[in-house]
Amino acid sequence: MAKEVKPPKEPDEPDLLPAMGLFTILIPMLLSMTAFQKLAIVEITLPERSMMNMTNADRPEPDQQALNLSLAITSDYLVIGARGGFQPNVYFKEMWTFRCKSDSKLITYSPEEVKAAVDAGHGPKCQDGKEMDKEKYLYEIESIELWALEKTSEEDPGRVIWAIYSSQGENVPDSAFVDGNNSFIAMTGEGPGGLKAPAALKKPNPGTPLATLTPNSARKLKPEDAQRNIIYPLSAYDLIAKDLIAIHTQFIDLEDVDNIIVVANDDTQFDKIISLMDRAKSAGFAKVNLAKLGGG
């Protein structure tokens, strides 16, 4: 005799009330424990540049205790502004460092050199002689470097400034050294554009007193560390970081001394913005906001 097959029962709907009650308790608790960083997006137009004078005689009155600090990046320079004035521009030459897939080694080119190669139907060339894919070479960029330039005028194309850096290997710069006067151990380069390291710039000997931009970093150079030092183009980020540290220290009593606005164009690579924000944080500016560079 055939056994009657009963159709399966529809599954009972889950009781969501206990879970909803749990979320009602958890969500407010989690929100109360979360620290939010406000990102301000505003359009500003830089006024005509003037020299920012920060002498003690020009310190603001107690009712004007506001620094209004900003750090702007354009296509060829960085500039710090405060209270309507601006420090001298820190000019730079943009360079792209690639990590080639073919040999896993680093190689550095200017954007102009890369564009010329691609326009000629080639990808940037690696150290082993092989070419990167001319359609996908951007994926092999490891870092965007801003080499500081010394310029006598805005029309001057400038010369690369070279400095002494510590390094962890692969000729990659780590921290720039400063001397007892808190000045970078640096010189302008030789040849066209200063792209050749100056022969007169020598690596410090073991036992030389040195420091970096990091607080309390002064020490005598150890022999094993001296062997790892390199001569490398001075980063415009390091020049700006040094100025930011000095400003934060000098104006520590101002009410907005921990605030800074990083100002950039829409087409500024995110890598540059992040690098500037990192330098500002390291200099002591805890509240870093972002603004769009307006104007012509």
Image: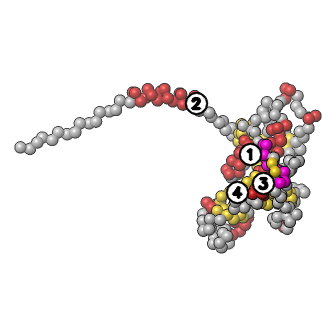
**Residue at (34, 32) in percent of width and height:** 14
Whether residue 213 appears in magenta in the rendering, the answer is: yes
Q: Which residue is mark 1?
A: 279
Disc on res. 35: none
Local SS, label 3: loop
- The answer to whether marks 3 and 1 mark residues whose Cβ atoms lie closer than 8 Å is no
User: Upstream in the sequence, badge 4 or badge 1?
Assistant: 4
Camera sees residue 27: yes
Q: Give the answer, above or below, for where 51 lies relative to 170.
A: above
243 in magenta:
no
Work out whether 235 lies above or below 11: below
The part of the chain drawn in magenta is 207-217
Q: Earlier in the sequence, mark 3 or mark 4?
A: 4
* 255 vs 242, nearest the viewer: 242
- Measure the alpha-carbon separation of dots 2 and 3: 45 Å
Residue 33 is labelled as 2
Give the quarter of the image for residue 203: bottom right
Mark earlier in primary sequence (2, 3)? 2
Marks 4, 1: nearer the viewer: 4
Per the picture, the main secondary structure of the magenta-coloured stretch is loop
Using the numbered discs, state the Cα–Cα distance from disc 4 to disc 1 in whole angstroms. 20 Å
- What quarter of the picture does the N terminus occupy? top left
Tag 4, which secondary structure? loop
Which mark is first along the chain, 1 or 2?
2
**Label 4 to label 2: alpha-carbon separation:** 39 Å
Three-letter amino acid code at the position of disc 1: Arg
Residue picked out by circle 3? 222
Residue at the far left: name it. 1
Residue to which mark 4 is pinned = 168
Say few, some or many: other residues with alpha carbon within 10 Å of mark 3 (under 14 / 14 to 19 / 20 or more): few
